[in-house]
Image (cartoon, helix red, strand yellow):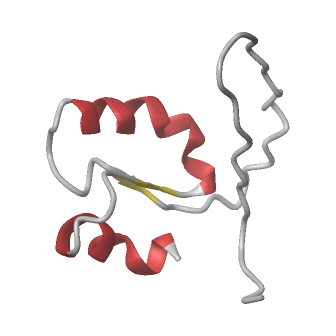
C-alpha cells in the first residue's frame, strides 16, 4: 500500500510525515532526522524500496525496560486478504 499511495500520503493529502517500507529499517535514522529538520520534502521522508537480498538475519530483538512498549507488525508482500 505504501508503494502505491506514497505521493498521496506525503504530498497531496498530507496524511503522513514519512512513509517507510519493511526493508528501510537501516535508513530510519536518516529519514527521521530529515523529517525532524523539516528538510527537503517527500523524497527525503520516504523509502519504500524492497530488497531481494534482505533476510533480517542480523536483526536481534532488543527490550528496554521501564517505559511504554509496543509491537510493530512488519509484513513483506500482500495476499490481499
Please say if 74 is above or below 15.
above
Residue 18: image location, x then y, percent: 36, 52
Residue 48: image location, x then y, percent: 48, 61
Q: List the single residue furthest toward the top.
A: 66
Number of callouts in the render?
0
Please say if 4 is above or below 19.
below
Query: Residue placed at 69% from the left, 29% from the top?
Result: 69
Residue 26: image location, x then y, percent: 56, 36
Give left or right: position of 17 versus 81: left
Q: Quadrant of the C terminus?
A: bottom right
Give left or right: position of 5 versus 79: left
Query: Residue placed at 14% from the left, 45% from the top?
Result: 40
Q: List the single residue furthest toward the bottom.
A: 80
Indicate the quadrant where residue 78 lies: bottom right
Q: Is 31 in front, or is 55?
A: 31
Please say if 74 is above or below 5.
above
Give left or right: position of 80 versus 6: right
Residue 72: image location, x then y, percent: 69, 47
Query: Residue placed at 28% from the left, 76% from the top?
Result: 8
Amino acid at each position: 500500500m505504501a508503494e502505491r499511495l506514497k505521493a498521496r500520503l506525503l504530498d497531496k493529502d498530507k496524511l503522513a510525515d514519512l512513509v517507510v517500507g519493511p526493508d528501510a529499517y537501516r535508513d530510519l535514522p536518516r529519514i527521521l532526522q530529515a523529517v525532524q529538520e523539516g528538510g527537503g520534502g517527500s523524497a527525503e521522508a520516504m523509502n519504500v524500496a524492497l530488497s531481494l537480498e534482505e533476510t533480517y538475519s542480523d536483526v536481534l530483538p532488543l527490550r528496554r525496560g521501564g517505559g511504554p512498549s509496543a509491537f510493530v507488525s512488519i509484513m513483506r508482500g500482500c495476499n490481499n486478504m
